[in-house]
Image (spheres, rainbow, N blue to C red):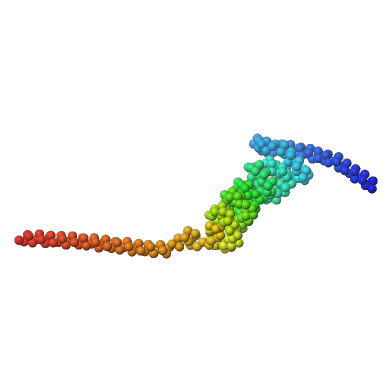
Amino acid sequence: MKISKLIAAICVIVLCILTPIRGNAQASWAAKTARELVEALIQKGGQQGAKELMELGGETLAREALEKAAQEGGEKLAQRLATLTLEHGAALLKVAKQSPSKFVSAFDELTPAMQKAAAQAITREPDLMARLFLKVGKEALTAAAKHPGVGTQVVEVLGREGAEVLSKVTTDEAIQLSRLAPKIAKVAEPERRALMELIGKAPGKIMDLLEQHPHVLRNGTALAAFLASKDQLLDLLLGGKKVGIGPDGKPIILKDGGFIARIVGLFRAPLAGMLGIVGIAIAGWATIKLWATYRVSRAKVKAAEKRISAAQGEERK
């Protein structure tokens, strides 16, 4: 028993001695690699590259990111991060610094084209991308890469739910979602999550309805009815039906070109009757006027004939 305790104590002591040594070795290696990386980045980017690197944090940022990488995954992970940074730009360190293992894993899962697009998004907005990656993870990289400029706006407002929808939509639909995002963000849970799931199933059609009928997002009762009818709504939309949303938030099947046409249709028959009556009245009035004009003209002709006859009689005498 005493021997086992002695061995255990010796192991603890050795571990305590070796841990700082290993940590110092990693720190020393990271510092050396950081200097080499900075030199390579400056050589690759010139004065502009050096300026951008200094604005990001320079050698200090590189050393901190590589030290964290070495702690999480050893020199292999740190070297991989250095390679990605040299290939795609120093801004990657800003995002990777928080969790190098998660960042490298997420970045490596992207296709080469998506990696390039994601790196460009990170270079444009390093601080924002760092926040979004911490908040959402890989989906933030995917959204920024797939929808340049607009993807980050949606994820910043709608978080993971927004990122999930962005993976299913076109860039035009992403722009449409960015317009609706501030209003959607004001919707309380769990309605917001249900709404985002509905948008994900038929993005363009649902967002068109929300833009055409803004009262749905302003009125909690209408939104509740809208979400309660989601299965019927999807069946109608995916079945090719023209759908509108009533004041109560429930779907309405549109005919004859839409809601306005339906309203006009309600008055079409009475309106036609009224127009017919007006037409008859105008025709009657015109007939009377013509008859009166004819009678006056006829009387004038007869009077003229009488005067001519009288004048001719005088001449004969």
Q: Image quarter for residue 249?
A: bottom right
Q: From the viewer's perspective, is residue 235 above or below residue 38?
A: below
Counting from the top left corner in percent of width and height, residue 150 is at: 60, 47
Q: Nearer the viewer, residue 70 or 114?
A: 70
* Number of marks in the rendered image: 0
Q: Position of residue 170 (x, y in %)?
A: 60, 53
Q: Position of residue 196 (x, y in %)?
A: 62, 54
Residue located 23% across and 62% down the image: 294
Residue ID at (26%, 61%)? 289
Q: Residue furthest front?
A: 221
Q: Is residue 119 left or right of residue 245?
A: right
Front-most of 76 and 309?
309
Residue at 61% across / 50% down in the picture?
185
Extreme-right residue of the structure: 2
Q: Position of residue 106 (x, y in %)?
A: 70, 49
View extreme (left): residue: 317
Looking at the image, which residue is at 43% across and 63% down? Answer: 268
Q: Is residue 215 visible?
A: yes
The image quadrant where one finds the C terminus is bottom left
Residue 291 falls in image quadrant: bottom left
Name the image quarter holding residue 35: top right
**Is 156 situated left or right of 72 in this image?**
left
Camera-side residue: 298 or 219? 219
Q: Can see residue 43?
A: no
> Is residue 272 left or right of 160 when viewed as pictured?
left
